[in-house]
Image (cartoon, rainbow, N blue to C red):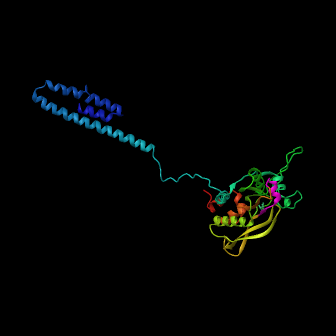
Amino acid sequence: LRNTYLARIAGAADAAQLEEVRLAALGKKGEISLKMRELGQMSPEERQTYGKALNVLKDELDAALRARKAAMEDAALDERLKAEWLDVTLPARHRPRGTIHPVSQVTEECTAIFADMGFAVAEGPQIETDWYNFDALNIAPEHPARQEHDTFFMHRAPGDNRPPHVLRTHTSPVQIRAMQEQGAPIRVIAPGRVYRMDMDQTHAPMFHQIEGMAIDRDISMANLKWVLEEFFTAYFGTKVKTRFRASHFPFTEPSAEVDIQCSWVNGQLRVGEGDGWLEVLGSGMMHPKVLRAGGIDPDQWQGFAFGMGIDRMAMLKYGIPDLRAFFESDLRWLRHYGFGA
Ligand code: PHE
C-alpha cells in the first residue's frame, strides 16, 4: 500500500493528478480512511498495532503529498522567472528627445523681461503687404531703403489684383497693425521671423527680430534709453554699457542705433567688458507720419520704437560665432551649446 501510493505521488504530473492521489488515499472515502474505520471491529490489541501503523502511513503519505506539491510550485515559479527574465545590464535603448532651440529660448527670455516692464505681445503676418512693410513706415516706393532691405517679393500672376506682397523685411509693420488694432496708449513687443536676401557669417536670409513700441502722452528718448538699459541688464545678468549713435530710419525721428560694450577674449566674445562695441538694435522716436498711418494723432501722442536682432542676442549670450549654424539643424552643434538632447 505504502509503496503504491508513494509511487503514484512521485508520478503525478500536475497538481490535479496529485489531488486525485490524495483523495484515493486520504480522502473521506480513501483507502487509508476506510481502513481506519475498520479499526472499530478489531480487538484492542490488534487496534493498537494496526492503528499505529496506519497513522504512521497516513503521516508519511501526507508529508510526501506536501513535498511533491511544494516541488511542483517551485518548478512553476522557476518556469515563470525564466520566462520573465530581464537582463538589467543591457545598455538602454537610445530615445532621442528634442529640446528648445536657442532662438526660441532667447525669444522667451526677452518676452518675459519686457512683460515685466508692461509690454504685451503683438503679432503680424510674415507675408505682408508692401504698404505695411514700407509705405506706412514712411518708406515711399522710390525710397532707397527698399533696395537696402534686399526684399523677397511675392510673385503675382497676371490678372491677380491683390495688393503686392513681400516677405516682411523687419518686424516694424507690426507697429502699424498694433496701433490700428489697439490705439493709444499702447506698449507692445512683436517677436518674429523676418527675411532679407543676404547670407554670410552674420547674416541669414531668414532671421528674427523683436520690435518694441510704447506710445503715451509724453514719451521721450529718455524712456527709450531706460527701457533698453533695463532690458540689457536683465538679459545679460550684469550691467552692460550702451552707446546710442545718431542714425537714420525713415520711420523714426530722431533715430539711434544702439551698441553694447563687448570684447574678444581668447576668441570668445564677452559682453560688458573691454573697449569694443557691437550694434544690436535700431531705434528712435516714432515719426508723426507713422503714428498717423496707425490712426493715432501725433499732436496728442508720442512713441518710441526699436527693432532688435534676436539671433544676435543669442550669439552674444551663448558665445556662438556663426549665425548660419542656427538654421542648419545640426544636432551636434545644438548639443555643443547645451541645447540638444
Ligand atoms: N526696422 C529696423 C530694422 O530692421 C529697426 C528699427 C525698428 C529701427 C524700430 C527703428 C525703430 O533695421
The residue shown at (25%, 26%) is 28
Q: Tell me what residue is drawn at x 16 percent, y 31 percent.
A: 51
Task: Using the rendered image of the protein, determine whether residue 331 is visible from the camera's viewpoint.
Answer: no
Q: Is residue 144 left or right of residue 340?
A: right
Closer to us: 310 or 42:
310
Asked if the magenta segment contains residue 144, the reply would be no
Where in the figure is residue 286, as x and y percent of width and height?
78, 61
Identify the residue at horizontal 84%, vertical 55% (top origin).
135
The image quadrant of residue 292 is: bottom right
Residue nearer the viewer, 207 or 28: 207
In the image, 39 versus 206, the foreground residue is 206
**Residue 39 coordinates in the image, percent (x, y):** 16, 27
Residue at (28, 29) in percent of width and height: 23
Residue 191 vertical placement versus 19 (above, below): below
Asked if residue 140 shows in the view, the reply is: yes
Q: Quadrant of the C terminus?
A: bottom right
Left or right: 136 with respect to 271? Answer: right
Task: Tell me if residue 286 is in the magenta stretch.
Answer: yes
Number of callouts in the render? 0
Q: Quadrant of the N terminus?
A: top left
Front position in the image: 340 or 77: 340
Picture quadrant where residue 310 is located: bottom right
Give the x, y percent position of residue 159. Answer: 89, 43
Q: Quadrant of residue 227?
A: bottom right
Residue 151 in the image: state x and y as whole percent: 82, 57
Q: Can you name the residue that lies furthest to the bottom here? A: 275
Magenta-tinted stretch? 284-296
Of the four image quadrants, the one with ligand 1 is: bottom right
